[in-house]
Image (spheres, helix red, strand yellow):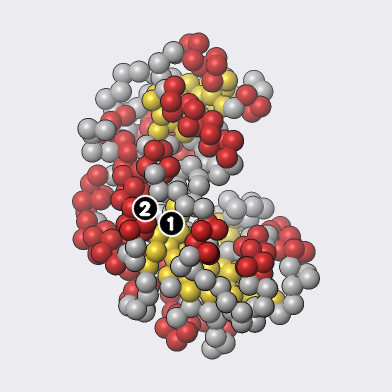
Amino acid sequence: MEYPDLWAYLRTVRKPIYLYGMGNGADTLLQLLTRIGVRVRGVFASDEFVRYQSFHGFSVTSYAEARAAAPHMLILVAFGSSRPEVMANIARLAREQELYAPALPLFGGELFTAAYARAHARELAEVYARLADEASRLAFRELVAYKLHGDIRHLFACETPQAEVFSTFFHLRPGESYADLGAYTGDTIAQFAALCPQYRRIYGMEPDARSFRKLLQSTKNLPRTTLWNACCADRPQFLSFCARGGRNSSLGEGRPMPAYPLDSILGGTPISYLKMDVEGQEAAALEGARRSIAAFRPKMLVSAYHRSEDLFALPLRVLKIRPDYRIYLRHHPYIPEWDTNYYFV
């Protein structure tokens, strides 16, 4: 793309623009496009979701109906998925039409535009120079290009199956003590227990009440497991939490929830593996685990896709605590970039 970023390019497009998908992502994207003066022609959905629905005044059609009305269109993907059949369908549409999957921050307002990249060039360069291998540097380059242009080919160019991470540089050994911040319903705890059956301890924190009930059920047969229905934070406090009963739960307008730093919960107990996927609160969670990170240097998996600054701000924060970490970056199959993690070893 000859334009500096997708948003500049969209202002010049003459062909009709269609949104693919409905929901929160489409709401955000439509509001943004309206704000920058980009007109949307219509909205289409996968055949099983059409059902004669309307979305912000648009009649939701199938792709076939949209293509009949506009044989040559520009498609903006307005939802996320890691399901192989859905990703394959998006790739098929990209072969038929001009298609982009805009990189919209899930939390925080700043878009990763060309101006944003220039403003943070020093931090981006500093992190890039600290990456531990060429696969990480490739992922970094492709993710920056993707964030600027929304071209899904950049995501495909740096995909890595997560199983490869655990079989190469991120080894789990007998006797690991694992802290899972954002434990959800227990999927990542189950993964850990399968990879490391001779673990020492498991700690899990999940604020959403419905997910926490499922977490209790899924871990009931795992010994030496301690769980908290709470948010993680940089200091003890109450935070307003919007519970949606799933992965979309996050801080926001809702009921007060207790929030604790991991350091205060562990009370000096060692951990050897720390995972953070806490819906945009990773920076606060890292601050709340500062003493444990400094003292025990646990292996860490930290999600890096919730905010535009996560790509550079999170590793720089970790390096201030322990400058001796080796840093790996991996993007696992997902459109958009919602399964991108830093691994600290």
Horizontal and vertical percent position of residue 39: 38, 24
Say which element carries label 1.
strand
Residue drawn at x 48%, y 32% as measured from the top left: 91
> Seen from this angle, which residue lies furthest top?
68
- Pick whichever, 130 or 269, lies toward us: 130
> Spatial distance from mark 2 to mark 1, Cα to Cα?
6 Å
* Amino acid type at image mark 2: Ala
Q: Is residue 315 left or right of residue 177?
A: left
Of the 4 image quadrants, the one containing the N terminus is top left
State yes or no: discs 2 and 1 in contact (Cβ < 8 Å).
yes
Residue drawn at x 44%, y 13% as measured from the top left: 70
- Residue under circle 2? 139
Q: Is residue 223 left or right of residue 114?
A: right
Residue drawn at x 45%, y 48% as measured from the top left: 159
Horizontal and vertical percent position of residue 295: 45, 86
Horizontal and vertical percent position of residue 34: 38, 31
Task: Answer with the quarter of the image where residue 121 lies.
Answer: bottom left
